[in-house]
Image (spheres, rainbow, N blue to C red):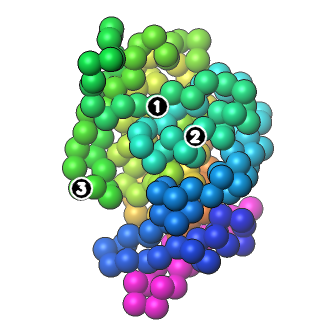
Amino acid sequence: MNFLEERIIKDGIVKPGNVLKVDAFLNHQMDISLLDEIGHEFHRRFADCPITKVLTIEASGIAIAYPVASAFGVPMVFAKKSKSINIDGEMYVAEVESFTHKNKNQVVVSKRFLGPEDHVLIIDDFLANGCALQGLISIVESAGATVEGLGIAVEKGFQIGGRVIRNLGYRLESLAIVDAMDDETGEITFRKQD
């Protein structure tokens, strides 16, 4: 069992509807030491890639992506879920559906921040159905940039997202893959990984 799986067992809460709450340490209250460890682990896993940018989606992905970008010494870019008055110029746009929030959003990234010269590592906190990742992949490809890989803190292995992304041929690394959860007992089963 790795460091993130141990923390999920200790402080994660299984809720009805295949919801795993990790808000005590990952996406509401944040354990900074844990986030630093996540950053170092993704750096180790993707050390063979020529990463020039780390890309994520607001809001929960930002906390995961920041230490990853710091470990690589590259900028972090995040896709915004709405266009505000302070975003100007041309945008890459993708529509993404959120499993957690049960809604669709258009996400945007300024064309100033991604280009054909970039080698991108996409990072997010959760992977369920893969819609957010597919949206981010389409933004990277629209920019003519290269997707070097995708890093996920917690993958719900019993949902289709991981299989879809891997079947598309992308390198996907998940720190914890949950194969089953029981909201009555609170039991969580993780997939064995190398």
Magenta stretch: helix, strand or loop mostly: loop
Residue 49 visible? The answer is no
Mark before the other along the chain sequence, 3 or 1: 1
In terms of secondary structure, where does tag 3 sit? loop
Q: Circle 3 is placed at which residue position? A: 102
Q: Residue furthest bottom?
A: 185
Q: Earlier in the sequence, mark 2 or mark 3?
A: 2
What residue is shown with label 2?
A: 65
Q: Quadrant of residue 14?
A: bottom left
What crowding class fits label 1: few (fewer than 14 Cα within 10 Å), some (14-19), or many (20 or more)?
Answer: many
Three-letter amino acid code at disc 2?
Answer: Ala
At x 45%, y 48%, the residue is 60
The answer, for residue 182, to whether it is visible in the render is yes
Q: Report the label total.
A: 3
Q: Which residue is mark 1?
A: 78
Identify which residue is drawn at 49% across, 44% down: 61
Q: Which residues are magenta?
A: 179-194
In the picture, residue 86 is in which quadrant?
top left
